[in-house]
Image (spheres, rainbow, N blue to C red):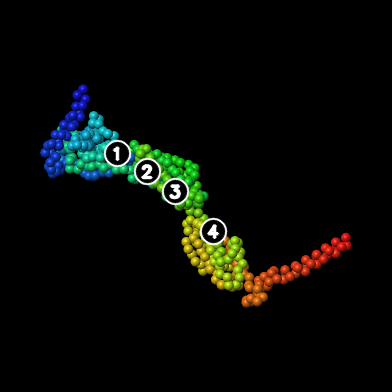
């Protein structure tokens, strides 16, 4: 049965011979003009992903490669070379993770690494065999470094508007051939439709996507949305997106300086000081204006609030005050009626106005009239009772 292991013995013997010979002392290109290799000296590949590494080589102009020339990538371990990838020689074993993709006959030694494992961290060497013409390129021996998975998926950036259906897409990292990741979306939104698909390129590599359709509402604003991509049970990567949902303004009026729960109208007396505050909730930020009888007022603005100060109230401050707020998604307004009552005349300073007269009539004249009328009604009842 020894003959079944003969190719492996020959392969190992060849490497021991080459390493021990003077062929590998000094610079190969200088000792052998015309033989040159161009590729990266170091390659990093994340677990679960892949990398395509360009590589080209030359031979002397008076030499020619056969069409079925064999290309081989070796991995070194403890000064021993092991076949990792080959082309045009089915007898040479490969590990399936390191693939020689280039057309060796045209001087292309490009290779592809997919889903590497820590054991793949090593130094590699390229060699071709074309009939009697053999050569191993030792000037550049790429070192492959296998790292942990750090790349994250990406979520598309479509505009989110309250009440308008939208589709978001999550794109898996990497562009590989045989790796098929799984997608999982999580968040507060209610997903109405999900679709997973991929795009295949001319070189056989693929990009994987997952899209979801939902209707955003203001309730979801700033809530997190996650897209998790699983390559293996121990190889998971995810991305978090904070939902920026746009919506029309809503408004709240606060009146400071008086004791009232009514924000539609408020009664003030001469000399009072009040503040009308208009607080708006919107996305994007709304424009806010206070008007009195269709004239714009001076106001104090702080983020999404605008305030108007009425200091030392006089009759001229009475009237209709309106707050308007709007963004591209809508406009809203609220009205506050300021009702002025002057100070009563009985012993207090101030000039009586029509409003103050009404105040005196309601609070003084009417009670004085009601009492005699009540007494007359009571006397009539007594007379009727005696008559009966």
- Local crowd size for mark 1, using a 10 Å CA cut-off: few (<14), some (14–19), many (≥20): many
Q: Tell me if 226 is positioned left or right of 65 in this view.
A: right
Looking at the image, tell me whether mark 1 or mark 4 is earlier in sequence order: 1
User: Could you tell me which quadrant the C terminus lies in?
Assistant: bottom right
Q: Which residue is mark 4?
A: 251
Please identify the quadrant where the N terminus is shown.
Answer: top left
Whether residue 349 is visible, yes or no, is yes
In the rendered structure, the answer to whether residue 280 lies left or right of residue 236 reads: right
Mark 2 and mark 4 residues within 8 Å of each other at the beta carbon: no
Q: Compare marks 2 and 4 and give the one earlier in the sequence.
A: 2
Using the image, determine if residue 112 lies above or below residue 307. above
Element under disc 2 = strand
Q: Residue furthest left?
A: 22
For the point 31% across and 43% down, which residue is it?
148
Whole-angstrom CA distance, mark 2 to mark 3, is 16 Å
Residue 152: image quadrant is top left
x, y percentage for residue 68? 22, 33
Mark closer to the chain start, 3 or 4: 3
Q: Residue furthest right?
A: 387
Residue drawn 20% across and 28% down?
Answer: 7
**Above/below status of 4 relative to 216:** above
Report how many numbered discs are placed on residues in the image. 4
Q: Is 204 left, or right, of 332 in this rendering?
A: left
Q: Secondary structure at mark 4?
A: strand
Q: Which residue is mark 1?
A: 116
Along the viewing direction, whichever of 240 and 198 lies nearer the viewer = 240
Distance of label 3 from label 4 (alpha carbons): 26 Å
Mark 3 = which residue?
224
Please name the residue shown 14% across and 40% down the image. 24
Query: Eyeballing the image, is 6 above or below 195?
Result: above
The residue wearing badge 2 is 237
Residue in the image at 75% along x and 67% along y:
370
């Amino acid at each position: 049965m020894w003959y079944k292991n003969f190719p492996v013995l020959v392969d190992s013997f060849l490497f021991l011979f080459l390493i021990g010979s003077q062929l590998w002392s000094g610079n190969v290109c200088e000792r052998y003009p015309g033989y040159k290799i161009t590729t990266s000296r170091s390659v990093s590949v994340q677990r679960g992903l892949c990398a395509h590494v360009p590589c080209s080589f030359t031979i002397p102009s008076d030499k020619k490669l056969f069409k079925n020339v064999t290309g081989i990538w070796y991995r070194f371990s403890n000064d021993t070379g092991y076949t990792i990838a080959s082309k045009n020689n089915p007898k040479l074993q490969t590990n399936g993770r390191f693939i020689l993709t280039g057309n060796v006959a045209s001087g292309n030694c490009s290779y592809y690494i997919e889903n590497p494992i820590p054991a793949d961290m090593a130094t590699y060497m390229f060699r071709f065999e074309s009939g009697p013409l053999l050569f191993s390129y030792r000037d550049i021996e790429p070192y492959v470094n296998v790292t942990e998975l750090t790349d994250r998926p990406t979520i598309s950036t479509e505009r989110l508007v309250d009440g308008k259906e939208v589709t978001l897409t999550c794109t898996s990292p990497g562009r590989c051939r045989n790796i098929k990741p799984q997608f999982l979306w999580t968040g507060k939104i209610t997903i109405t439709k999900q679709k997973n698909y991929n795009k295949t390129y001319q070189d056989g590599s693929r990009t994987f996507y997952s899209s979801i359709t939902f209707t955003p509402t203001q309730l979801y604003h700033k809530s997190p949305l996650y897209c998790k991509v699983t390559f293996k049970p121990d190889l998971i990567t995810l991305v978090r997106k904070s939902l920026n949902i746009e919506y029309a303004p809503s408004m709240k009026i606060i009146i400071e300086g008086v004791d009232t729960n009514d924000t539609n109208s408020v009664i003030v007396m001469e000399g009072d000081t009040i503040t009308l505050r208009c607080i708006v909730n919107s996305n994007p930020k709304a424009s806010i204006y206070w008007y009195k009888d269709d004239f714009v007022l001076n106001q104090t603005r702080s983020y999404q609030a605008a305030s108007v100060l009425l200091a030392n109230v006089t009759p001229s401050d009475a009237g209709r005050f309106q707050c308007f707020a709007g963004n591209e998604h809508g406009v809203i307004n609220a009205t506050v009626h300021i009702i002025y009552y002057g100070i009563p005349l009985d012993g207090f300073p101030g000039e009586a106005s029509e409003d103050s007269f009404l105040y005196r009539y309601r609070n003084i004249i009417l009670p004085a009239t009601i009492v005699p009328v009540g007494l007359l009604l009571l006397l009539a009842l007594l007379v009727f009772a005696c008559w009966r």
